[in-house]
Amino acid sequence: MTSVDATLRATRTTCPYCGVGCGVLATPDGSGGAAISGDPEHPANFGRLCSKGSALGETLGLDDRLLYPMIRVSKGTMERVAWSDALDHIAHRFAHIIKRDGPGAVAFYLSGQLLTEDYTSPTS
Ligand code: SF4
């Protein structure tokens, strides 16, 4: 269990994992993590979170997180590249797969809440 300094304020946010969009209270623990709880005032969940949402705090560490684009250059070898090169590479690979196997060969799996904060930031 994460220990939380009671003087740190909780931030109201939204669980990113599915289209329900449960309200979350994230309270910084002072060392890069946060204690997570359901927002009792949010109309989607009234304070409750499922097991995925409850585990959001376990995903905040940067130790095993990819922080910049990498492309596999050989088996077991990854190389850091610029975002523009990574996006060009992805577009090229998608175009190749679609040309070879048809448009049904590619799909995206996204969450309805994945970009909530990203959408909100530039419009606020
Ligand atoms: S807490 Fe569970 S039900 Fe709520 S948005 Fe997250 S994944 Fe969906």
Image (cartoon, helix red, strand yellow):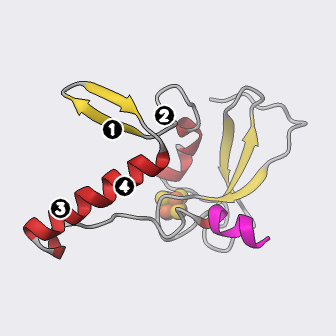
Coordinates of residue 75 in the picture (x, y in percent): 18, 27
Q: How far apart in space, not on screen, are marks 3 and 1 (Cα)?
A: 17 Å
Q: Which residue is mark 4?
A: 88
User: Between disc 1 and disc 2, whose residue precedes?
Assistant: 2
Q: How far apart in space, not on screen, are marks 2 and 3 (Cα)?
A: 28 Å
Disc 1 residue crowd, few under 14, some 14–19, many 20+, Cα 10 Å = some
Q: Which residue is mark 3?
A: 96
Q: How far apart in space, not on screen, are marks 2 and 4 (Cα)?
A: 22 Å
Where does the magenta region start and end?
117-124
Is disc 4 placed on a helix, strand or loop? helix
Is disc 2 placed on a helix, strand or loop? loop
Q: How far apart in space, not on screen, are marks 3 and 4 (Cα)?
A: 12 Å
User: Between disc 2 and disc 4, whose residue precedes?
Assistant: 2
Q: Which residue is mark 2?
A: 65
Query: Label 2 near label 1: C-beta < 8 Å?
Result: no
For badge 4, the amino acid type reads Asp
Is disc 1 placed on a helix, strand or loop? strand
Disc 4 residue crowd, few under 14, some 14–19, many 20+, Cα 10 Å = few
